[in-house]
Image: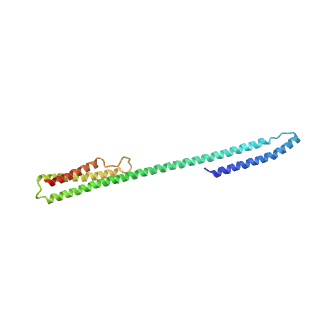
């Protein structure tokens, strides 16, 4: 609010009212003398009443305009604050989605790395035990290799799906079925590689 303008307007009203009273007071004595001398009755109170009414109307209009202007400014500031709050919430949601996607991609990379390491270890063990391994051990080891390679490929596809789902969507960030399948294939492949060692 423009309090300085309101105070100036109030001071102006007080000064004008005092001037009107001073004008009215000497005029009343003079008019009573004139009335006594001339016998006519001139109404100076009506003139000052009109001036006061007009001044009051002007001041009221000025105050109303100042209040309307301040109200419009407050509404504009409120709208700007609301827009800033909405943008901050959107930025926070985007940052939380990005962090969730980073965690999911890190989990899938761990699955892929474990699958690759397990496949390399299974191949190395079969090469070391090639002359002593039975046909059953070789076949279980081959199934384990396939499962580990499938887990590796599924983890890579799930990483691509998570990376593609981050921008512009409001769905939760997760690898979906591919992440679950990759973990299941990894566990099955490692189990087959361990079973192949028993034969």
Residue depicted at 34% across the width and 51% down the height: 164
Q: Where is residue 136 in the image (x, y as percent from the top left)?
A: 12, 52
Q: Give the left or right position of residue 198, taking residue 2 as reference.
A: left
Q: Report the colour scheme.
A: rainbow
Q: How many numbered circles are shown?
A: 0
Give the vertical position of 79 relative to 130 (above or below): above
- Give x and y (percent) for residue 28: 82, 44
Q: Which residue is drawn at 61% across and 46% down?
A: 67
| Residue farthest along the bottom direction in this orientation | 128
Residue 113 is left or right of residue 89, and the answer is: left
Which residue is rendered at x = 71% and y = 45% of the image? 55
Residue 173 picture location, percent across and down = 35, 49
User: Which residue is nearer to you in this view: 68 or 7?
Assistant: 7
Q: In the current view of this chain or complex, which residue is farthest to the front?
A: 198
> Residue 186 at x, y = what percent?
23, 52
Residue depicted at x 26% and y 48%: 181
Horizontal relation, residue 18 to residue 171: left or right: right
């Amino acid at each position: 609010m423009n309090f300085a303008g309101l105070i100036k307007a109030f001071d102006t009203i007080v000064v004008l009212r005092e001037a009107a009273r001073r004008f009215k007071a000497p005029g009343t004595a003079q008019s009573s003398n004139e009335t006594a001398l001339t016998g006519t009755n001139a109404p100076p109170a009506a003139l000052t009443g009109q001036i006061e009414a007009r001044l009051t109307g002007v001041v009221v209009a000025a105050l109303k305009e100042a209040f309307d202007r301040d109200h419009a400014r407050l509404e504009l500031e409120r709208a700007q604050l609301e827009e800033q709050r909405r943008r901050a919430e959107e930025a926070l949601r985007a940052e939380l989605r990005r962090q969730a996607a980073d965690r999911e991609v890190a989990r899938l990379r761990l699955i892929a790395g474990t699958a690759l390491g397990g496949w390399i270890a299974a191949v190395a063990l079969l090469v070391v035990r090639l002359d002593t391994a039975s046909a059953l051990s070789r076949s279980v080891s081959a199934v384990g290799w396939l499962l580990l390679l499938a887990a590796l490929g599924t983890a890579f596809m799930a990483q691509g799906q998570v990376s593609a789902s981050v921008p512009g969507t409001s769905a939760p960030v997760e690898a979906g079925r591919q992440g679950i399948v990759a973990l299941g294939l990894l566990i099955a492949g490692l189990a087959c590689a361990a079973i192949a060692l028993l034969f």
